[in-house]
Amino acid sequence: MNSNDIHLGISHQITAVYNGSNIRIYLDGMLKNTSNPITGNISTSDVPVFIGQINNSEFFNGFIYEI
């Protein structure tokens, strides 16, 4: 995926899929990138996930839909 794929003022859908060996990134339903094979377990954590926020101080300025 590169900066030419995302245009301001237009809604986009970004999806990440893990199938047990690779991560695939889709933009608006089109495959944009596939990782090299990944092994091991997915880690778990009890730390909260924040979407659209970094360090409790920087916030995404826009709309986030369908999480």
Image (cartoon, rainbow, N blue to C red):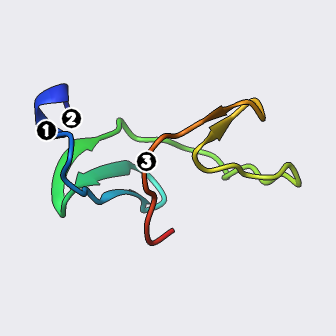
Q: Callout 2: helix, strand or loop?
A: loop
The quadrant holding residue 46 is bottom right
Q: Which quadrant: the N terminus?
A: top left
State the residue position of label 2: 1
Please name the residue that numbered disc 1 is placed on. Answer: 5
Of 34 and 12, the residue lying toward us: 12
Return the disc, 3 or 2, that comes first in the chain's sequence: 2
Spot occupied by residue 27 in the image (x, y as percentages of width and height): 22, 52
Give above or below for 4 relative to 52.
Answer: above
**Residue 39 percent location from the top left of the image:** 55, 44
Q: Nearer the viewer, mark 3 or mark 1?
A: 3
Q: Is residue 61 above or below residue 15?
A: above
Residue that badge 3 annotates: 62
Task: State the CA–CA distance, disc 1 to disc 2.
Answer: 6 Å
Quarter of image, res 44: bottom right
The residue lying at 31 percent from left, 49 percent from top is 25
* Residue situated in front as seen by the camera: 59 or 12: 59
Q: Residues within 10 Å of mark 3 (few under 14, many from 20)?
A: few
Considering the numbered disc 1 on the image, is that residue within a helix, a strand or a loop? helix
